[in-house]
Every structure is written in C-alpha cells, then in structure tokens.
C-alpha cells in the first residue's frame, strides 16, 4: 500500500484491504450464524479492530442486527472507500 494519503486506490490496494478485512467479515458471519443477528459492535462480538495504513475499518449495523457493513478509507483524504455489505459483499467507491 502507498503511504501517500492523496493517491487514488489502485486495484492492488483495494484487493489488499479486502484481504485485511476478510477476517472481520468471517467473524461477523460466524457471529450471525450463532446468534441470528449481527453484533451491535465489533467489541460486543469480541472481534479485535484492524488498523491499516488507510485507517481502521468502521462497522455499522442496522435493522436490529439484520444488516451490517464495514468500510475503510475516506473521500476527503484518500478519494476512495472500500465497503463490505452483508447484502452484496465487497465493493469499491471511487
């Protein structure tokens, strides 16, 4: 990954961020399988945060735990955001 916060994300950067975030997705999916809903927070599920050169992954849960999402990056500094949605999987916003 690049250390320049103003560079656009390359496909390699996006792929690396997905790789870093996949253990979070796996843990969230396992939690949902065991409890029927996604956790209220990563900490509530005992999932340690993952910090990356692009910043930490952020987690949101909605609809009483029926839907969840992760995202990393911000448009103001890095001009991209990579997301995982419980409904559609990983995708890149540029």
Image (cartoon, rainbow, N blue to C red):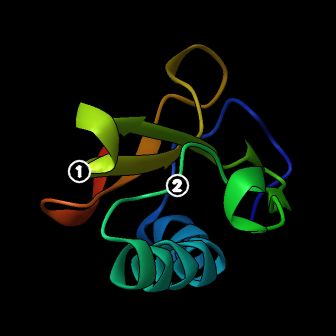
The spot of residue 60 in percent (x, y) is: 47, 37
The spot of residue 59 in percent (x, y) is: 55, 43
Furthest residue in direction left, as rendered:
88
Gap in Å between the C-alphas at discs 2 and 1?
A: 9 Å
Above or below: residue 76 compared with residue 57:
above
Furthest residue in direction front, as rendered:
35
The spot of residue 8 in percent (x, y) is: 52, 42
Q: Relative to the observer, which residue lies in front, 10 or 72?
A: 72
Q: Secondary structure at mark 1?
A: loop
Residue at 50%, 21% in the rendered image: 75
Q: Quadrant of the N terminus?
A: bottom right
Q: Secondary structure at mark 2?
A: loop
* 5 lies left or right of 72: right
* 66 lies left or right of 44: left
Above or below: residue 52 compared with residue 63:
below
* 7 lies left or right of 61: right
Q: Residues within 10 Å of mark 2 (few under 14, many from 20)?
A: many
The spot of residue 81 in percent (x, y) is: 45, 39
Picture disc at residue 39: 2
Residue at 77%, 57% in the rendered image: 2
Residue at 59%, 77% in the rendered image: 16
Q: Relative to the observer, which residue lies in front, 45 or 69?
A: 45
Q: Relative to the observer, which residue lies in front, 52 or 34?
A: 34
Above or below: residue 25 compared with residue 71:
below
Picture disc at residue 38: none
Q: Is residue 94 visible?
A: no
Asked where in the image residue 78 lies, by quadrant, the reply is: top right
Residue beneath label 1, please? 66
């Amino acid at each position: 990954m690049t250390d320049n916060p103003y560079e656009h994300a390359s496909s390699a950067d996006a792929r690396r961020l997905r790789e870093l975030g996949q253990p979070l997705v796996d843990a969230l999916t396992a939690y949902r399988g065991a409890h029927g809903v996604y956790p209220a927070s990563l900490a509530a599920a005992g999932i340690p945060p993952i910090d990356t050169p692009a910043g930490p992954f952020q987690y949101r849960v909605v609809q009483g735990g029926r839907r969840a999402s992760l995202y990393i990056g911000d448009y103001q500094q890095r001009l991209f955001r990579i997301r995982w949605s419980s409904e559609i999987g990983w995708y890149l916003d540029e």
